[in-house]
Image (cartoon, rainbow, N blue to C red):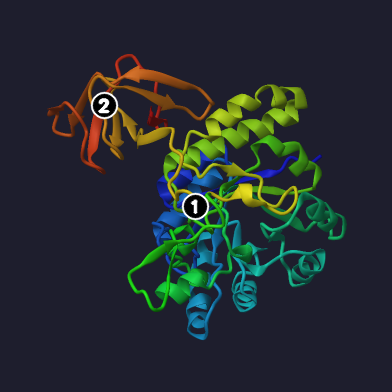
Amino acid sequence: MNKPELLIPASNLETLKVAVLYGADAVYIGGEAFSLRAAADNFSYDDMREGIAFAHSKGKKVYVTANILAHNNDLKEAEEYFAELKSIAPDALIISDPGMFNIAKKVCPDIELHVSTQANNTNYGTYNFWHSLGAKRVVSARELSLKELREIRDNIPADLEIETFVHGAMCISYSGRCLLSNFMTSRDANQGACTHPCRWKYSIVEEERPGEYMPVFENERGTYIFNSKDLCMIEYIPELVSAGIDSLKVEGRMKTALYVATCARTYRLAIDDYFKSENTYRNNMEWYKEQISACTYRKFTTGFFFGRPDKDTQIYDSNTYEKKYTYLGLIEDVSPEGRVRITQKNKFSVGEVIEVMRPDGTNREYEVKGIYTLDGESRESAPHPKEVLYIDLGDAIVDEYDILRRRE
């Protein structure tokens, strides 16, 4: 059995470093153009260069997404963009549009080309087609079962890799190719500007009775009719491995460092434990399930892996996340006095007990002994997002890139 790659998303340089340090084998990112997450922070050219250098220094890879469905006016700019990427040498480009693929192949012949899930890759004929054009890897459609993935593996060349989403948000539309956002808000999901109307609450208005809103539901379940649960395959690593999948991909290029660290660490330990022994993996399952629930999520489903989803894969009564922890900040530095510097993300106060999450899988609780500004002014609480602060955690054993969180 080949040990699969763990592929983790990153929205900015900070989360890229977190992904690498918490267990990713590879990280996928978006630049400031041609990425399907226009609302994410995304990477400047300089940040991309620094992130790739950081990952390579740790023996990890970085893939850059350029997976929009291009229009005519995108093509010239795409050629210039790929020429810029060539000089910083990411390990692969993730592309869905055939025209963009041809440009990348011409401009960046030494960079691997991966075919995005947006290309609707649902059969081995499609995989073989992309392989004939020079693709190194194809990202499977989320709508495939494990049985179909095994059949694909059996009918494609051994050197053609299969990448599959195993965790994160599910799109209501086939392989994410949605027109709903464009139709309703003129923001095109296929150009990176999705407004997620699938998560909205819908009502019916009868033409002759404007202003009278009637709920939409089949029965008592509710009115969030397109609102899917999140994918989670932490319990099925053996099945994913036996299907011949080369890369296990986590969704979430707009998520926090806490989400990235939680997913990277949990899947890293689960994969490693399984390759030590299946008994070790099975015995630690409750811990994996507890840890993977530590970031925000919309309950969990196994998606299409074991057959078509049914009514239980939707959430009908709410579009809010489950939330067991609040992200407080990432440790950026530790002073000689032992105080930790963070850019504060959510409010906390002196006297609270918070948790330090570390890449090795350990979590430790410490009381907040003090909060200080950069000028040394003492604070009783940290109410202002993005304020840089020093935190006194007493005799806590901490390092740069440890994460502070609070159990809710």
Tell me where residue 26 appears, x and y as whole percent.
59, 47
| Residue lying furthest right | 154
Q: Does residue 212 appear left or right of residue 106 in this picture?
A: left
Q: Position of residue 9 (x, y in %)?
A: 52, 50
At 63% across and 65% down in the image, what residue appears?
Answer: 174
Q: Which residue is mark 2?
A: 391
Left/right of residue 154 with respect to residue 132 in the rendered view: right
Figure quadrant of residue 385 = top left
Q: In this view of the protein, which residue sits in the foreground, 393 or 336?
A: 393
On the rendered structure, is 309 left or right of 300? right
Residue at 65 percent of width and 72 percent of height: 105
What residue does disc 1 label?
A: 222
Amino acid type, residue under disc 1 in the picture:
Gly
Picture quadrant of residue 278: top right
Can you name the residue that lies furthest to the bottom here? 72
From the viewer's perspective, is residue 386 above or below residue 66? above
Give residue 18's position: percent from left, percent from top: 47, 40
263 or 289, which is in the foreground?
A: 289
- Marked residue nearer the N-terminal end (2 or 1): 1
Q: How many residues crowd around disc 1 within 10 Å: few (fewer than 14), some, or many (20 or more)?
A: some
Q: Residue at x 47, y 48 (%)?
A: 317
Callout 2 amino acid: Ile
Reply above or below: 218 against 389: below
